[in-house]
Amino acid sequence: MSQILHSSSVKKLITKGLKAECKSLRENNIFPQLKVILVGSDPASLIYTANKKKYCEKIGAICEIVALDEKISEADFRKTIDQINKDELVHGCIIQLPLPKHLSHLDVGHLVVKEKDVDGFNPENLYALMRNGNDSKDFISCTPKGILTLMQESQIAVAGKHVVIVGRSMIVGKPLAMLLTNHNATVTLAHSQTENLKTLTKSCDILVSAIGKANFIDETYISANKNQVIIDVGMNTDAQGQLCGDVHYERVVNLVSAITPVPGGVGPMTIVSLAQNLLQASKNKLSL
Ligand SMILES: NC(=O)c1ccc[n+]([C@@H]2O[C@H](COP(=O)([O-])OP(=O)(O)OC[C@H]3O[C@@H](n4cnc5c(N)ncnc54)[C@H](OP(=O)(O)O)[C@@H]3O)[C@@H](O)[C@H]2O)c1
């Protein structure tokens, strides 16, 4: 019987801790505050930012969505972020992606100062991850951090294991490879140019898929007798318009020892990690 790695119980437990932590910060006159910069009205971004605000408020933090006009000039966009960088009352700032075309050339990692970079994209935070990344004061990218937390809380060991990550984006695959390496996994980072992908995915202990293709990983990518763990990061829409992962869940679920569902697996952990980073930023400011 496969273990289904629902994140709901892990999220509930961590949320309880975050609420208590936030309460204690507030009692000490520290009011954790996140600014979410949203340019334009991309429908998915509206939902993602609203979810982030809702969760921050649930734990007792302040979250403002800074909604900017789709056509805002680069100078005004930069000015807005500079003001937030300097605002003593703000502890964390994230820029919701994607940005409109005329701003998409900007490297967002350089815009938010490292002390408020709760997305973990600032070069100094990325360097900290490269260097070691296990210092709790550093900000680790939210999705990789959430994946590790989910595995740890589900008693899935990564040390010494061979992990194949399919997808090498800056927000998932690359930072996750570094994070799991820091936790003593042996990591192979695969992508669209990887030869013999199935040989790799069949040989690993843990397979992480972050491709962005509905139901791409099916039973032909799995070794039925290897007790593999499958982490599905994908958030896609299938032919029926339903939310689904990169992994063909029904075809794979009975062949593996554990698997994350979509929805209800990795997705909710990303917001939890964001809130953890925000509270850490609030404590870092006081060197708590
Ligand atoms: N649950 C969450 O919180 C969360 C967070 C972030 C992303 N996501 C989801 O995760 C998925 C990936 O997102 P992303 O932003 O990382 O995607 P991305 O930037 O589009 O990167 C996709 C990666 O997949 C690789 N790839 C594409 N087709 C492939 C194939 N046939 N075989 C092997 N590799 C292939 C690409 O390789 P190349 O580099 O060679 O092009 C690329 O590295 C999406 O569904 C997204 O919605 C979920």
Image (tube, rainbow, N blue to C red):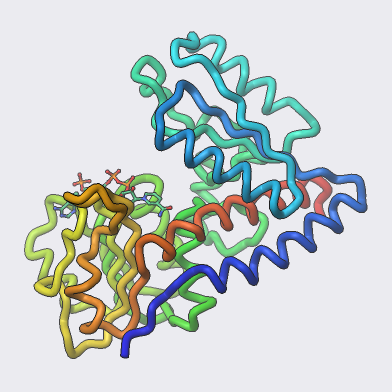
In the image, residue 282 above or below residue 149: above
Task: Please tell me in which quadrant of the rendered image residue 160 appears.
Answer: bottom left
Q: Nearer the viewer, residue 108 or 9?
A: 9
Q: Residue at x 51, y 14 (%)?
A: 69
Q: Nearer the viewer, residue 268 or 98?
A: 268
In the image, residue 251 above or below residue 83: below
Q: Residue at x 26, y 68 (%)?
A: 164
Q: Position of residue 2 (x, y in %)?
A: 32, 85
Relative to 27, 105 lies left or right: left
In this rendering, the count of numbered labels is: 0
Q: Position of residue 199 (x, y in %)?
A: 10, 72
Q: Residue at x 46, y 74 (%)?
A: 151
Task: Please tell me in which quadrant of the rendered image residue 105 appears.
Answer: top left
In the image, residue 195 above or below residue 120: below
Q: Quadrant of the N terminus?
A: bottom left
Asked if one can make out residue 280 in the rendered structure from this viewpoint, the answer is no
Q: Residue at x 60, y 40 (%)?
A: 117
Task: Please tell me in which quadrant of the rendered image residue 194 appears.
Answer: bottom left
Q: Quadrant of the C terminus?
A: bottom right
Q: Nearer the viewer, residue 43 or 75?
A: 43
Asked if one can make out residue 155 in the rendered structure from this viewpoint, the answer is yes
Relative to 162, 159 lies left or right: right
Q: Position of residue 169 (x, y in %)?
A: 32, 47
Relative to 83, 51 lies left or right: left
Q: Nearer the viewer, residue 32 or 236?
A: 236
Seen as rendered, the residue at the extreme right is 28
Q: Position of residue 116 (x, y in %)?
A: 65, 39
